[in-house]
Amino acid sequence: MLASRLILAASLVCAFALARGEQIYASEQCRQESAVLGLEAERIGAEASAALDQAGPSTGYGSLNSDLKRLVARSRDQGHRHCLAEFLRLTWHVRFQQNDLGSSKALLIEALQQFEPEERLSRQRNLVLGNLSYHQVMTGQFVEATQIIREMIAISIELQDADALAANYYLIADAYLKLGEIETAKRYFQYSIDPYTPSDGMDYYTGFSKLATIDRIQGSYARALQRHSQSLGYFQSEQSYRRIPARIEIARDHLAMGNHESAEQFANLAWNDSSAMLEQRIDAGLVLFDSASRQRNQSEAERLRLALSELLNQAQAHSGQRNANIIQELEYMTISARHFAARNELTKVLEVADETILLTQRISADVSRSGVNAMAWASRVDGIAQELAGYLWDKKPIDLAQWIDRLQSQSEKSNDQGSLGGQEFELLEELSKLERRLVDQQGLRTSDPVRLEQEMRMLAQSRDAVREAYVQVHTKRMVTKPMPARQYRSASTVAFVPAKDEILIRYYVRPSISIAFVYSDRSVVAVPVPPLSLISQMVDRAKQVIRDPGSPDVRPALRALAALLPLAQIRASDVRRILLVTDESTFSTPFSAIDLSDGKQLYRPLGAAFELVEVSHLESYGQADQRQSTASPGIAIFASPALSSVASRSSDGATKGWLHNLPKLDFSLAEAMVLRGLFADRPSHFYVGTEATAENLLSEQARSARILHISTHGYFRPDLAHVVGLAVAGSAKDAQQASFVTQSQLLSQPFHNALIVLGSCDSLQGQRYRGIGSYGLGQALIEQGTPVVVGTLWAIPDASAANFMTRFYRHLIASEGDSGYAMTQARSEMIMDRAYAHPRHWAAMTLLSRNREIERKLLPASPGVLSDRLEMNSVGKRQKLRVSKMMN
């Protein structure tokens, strides 16, 4: 084992990097300044590590504190800065393990100040940085922590130190896990153990244990228990202090499987262990509290609740930080909500709800600035929402609707992000290059799949390392606006009130409860919908038969989906617009194709009878347009990029990847020509063929047009959901090669368009966040500030997309930019056209909006258009639609 190998002295709850090889190096640095002090540093470092590993934080430190105080003063007096840095760090180490977090951060800050700028790559300095990053994670300072760890990852790569890189991946993975980025954390924990095998001991089993925790989060309980048991076996064989958090994780595994007796047995071992840290005692107590509340043992649950409240107060006092222990506090509130509900104490349940709002809002802005998706944090705090939902649904469903509105209010990113600096631009270029390679490799067909998998893993790790470096630079200029906290109780003060001709349906579908909240201009009602498991089956079945033109089961599958709708409210005579707020279970539902007939009548799709809009950012949807738009009045058309002319097989016979096997988009080109004619009296920019490059798509002209229309191939794979993008033509340097523009590239500069149309396949698909939804390219543009986006839920034929878009734009122009109306009219016309009546041609098209005012008036009137304006009939008075025999 290399002398510099990092031993991760990290528990599953309170972890920090303690590199024994680095610590020896730090002692040597001190010895060069003073032989006596160097020996002292080595002795104290060894004693502190032994105390942690063998005895735990509450014992074994003896006179270390007094020794360190003396040595810090001596180093400072003698001007030995490396010795001073090491003794300050060791003092932090001891205080941290004794739960004194409040005053210990200053020690690390002073230690960092001892290094000169040219010592940026110093191993001793990086050891201090690692300690500081974990201190900040544990005290809720996520922005600062992730930024430091990203710097350490970059330094590890620069030094080509594989062990340090593995340790730093562990550090940032733990931060991501706490913030809800489960898939990212899973990849990074895997990177942290890739250089090792079980024979490497602690290097391997700390990350291995974390992967077991993610197994449990993702529902693989038996696998989680097996992995945690393996880890515990190793920790016990080494008589390591890490046995305590390992037992807690095993207790959680048993609790998830309903094995209360086993869960309590392992949790009590940690709860009663005198060497356990305060953090571990809290975690063990939470397992016991959770088990007691699930078994309705109210007296025991109340005893544990009070004990935990005292421990959490102690932890808060020790940390000196307002956001410290936020994950434990959320878990405590979740269990408390269930406990109070079982005791039928409504007032206390509502108090917990309000405390949760305050807690999550305290950290929401930091989450956004840390480069973590807001959906991830919403998913992280969704557990308490589920506990409250089951109780408030029976008691006060309207309070539940308002509470969920407040809980899921997210920080908004400003559209004014400034310009890319030189370093950021270079990192973005490198990131995009790696993502292009990753996408193309993913599509390879080869005779050596094992080698391909190894190459993919190495490429993915390189991509993630560059991404962290890019995010570190990028987030420094990001601006966030926290959504204002709203203190409301009554139905008259809900976040959004629909117009008279609208209803809003907000879905809240979780394993324990399935509700649709229906908002009108007069009231809010809660309507039960089918359970999560059934909805998943219904949606999957509907999408399957829609994409199969020969299936005889289309009508039954689409009629079954009507169970998702509050039909009584929808059938109100004055409703013509339906606004939808979906979640993970419902976001990919083909709402427009749902059959409202009774099966004996002609097909009556929801999307032809009503305007359908999927609403993002409910708080801002009904507000007046506050943007100072810089968009020009015209359209930018980006379509039918010239694709690779290179043969699709490489010299070794392997089929080349995704970019080399894309079919031409002939209908996309024809569509672009039609759109150019429709907008002939308005300014336009036209990028097709070899002009449809990434440079032109990201140009100021494209990003500032009133409408940006994109028609090309989209990339999405569920097993690579964090990498999405669009196929584009090759650059001027290599026009013969198709290229790929990534989501990171697209979001690197602000888009000032009022409407962006993503006429590419799967453009609304992306990384899924449990309970919340999907973060694809369409949602990303909405989050960045684009008011209206049209995208697709799945792949559709090129000819169908072109036909739909031609109709959509014709009605958009005629209605002065009413996008909901234009979508409805386009669907209606296609349904009446025998060649396009089947929903596979139009049901994937979806309208996302964050502002009703802009959505309904995207285009100012043009003199040349007014004379040809189409008659806008009321949706409620439309004639019955004729459909093909195939649909009947």
Image (spheres, grey):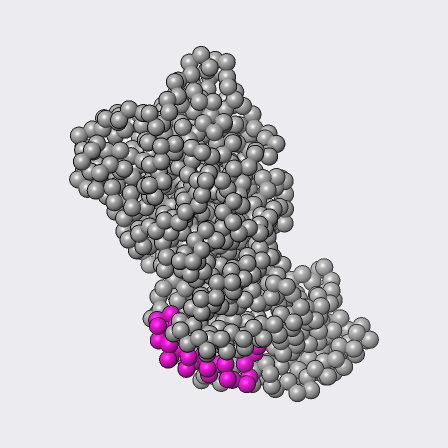
Residue lying at 71% horizontally and 68% vertically, measured from the top left: 106
Residue lying at 26% horizontally and 33% vertically, measured from the top left: 604
**Looking at the image, is 549 positioned above or below residue 250?**
above
Where residue 77 sits, quadrant-wise, is: bottom right
Where residue 757 sits, quadrant-wise, is: top left
Residue 663 visible: no
**Looking at the image, is 822 positioned above or below residue 678?**
below
Q: Is residue 277 magenta?
A: yes
Front residue of this view, candidates 781 and 132: 781
Front residue of this view, candidates 306 and 621: 306
Position of residue 693 measured from the top left corner of the image (x, y, whole percent): 47, 33
The region drawn magenta spans: 254-280
Residue lying at 41% horizontally and 47% vertically, measured from the top left: 525
Position of residue 95 measured from the top left corner of the image (x, y, whole percent): 66, 76
Q: Is residue 792 magenta?
A: no
Front residue of this view, candidates 311 and 429: 311
Position of residue 362 measured from the top left corner of the image (x, y, whole percent): 60, 57
**Looking at the image, is 11 positioned above or below residue 770?**
below
Position of residue 771 measured from the top left corner of the image (x, y, whole percent): 41, 54
Could you tell whether 306 is left or right of 252 in the image?
right
Q: Quadrant of the C terminus?
A: top left
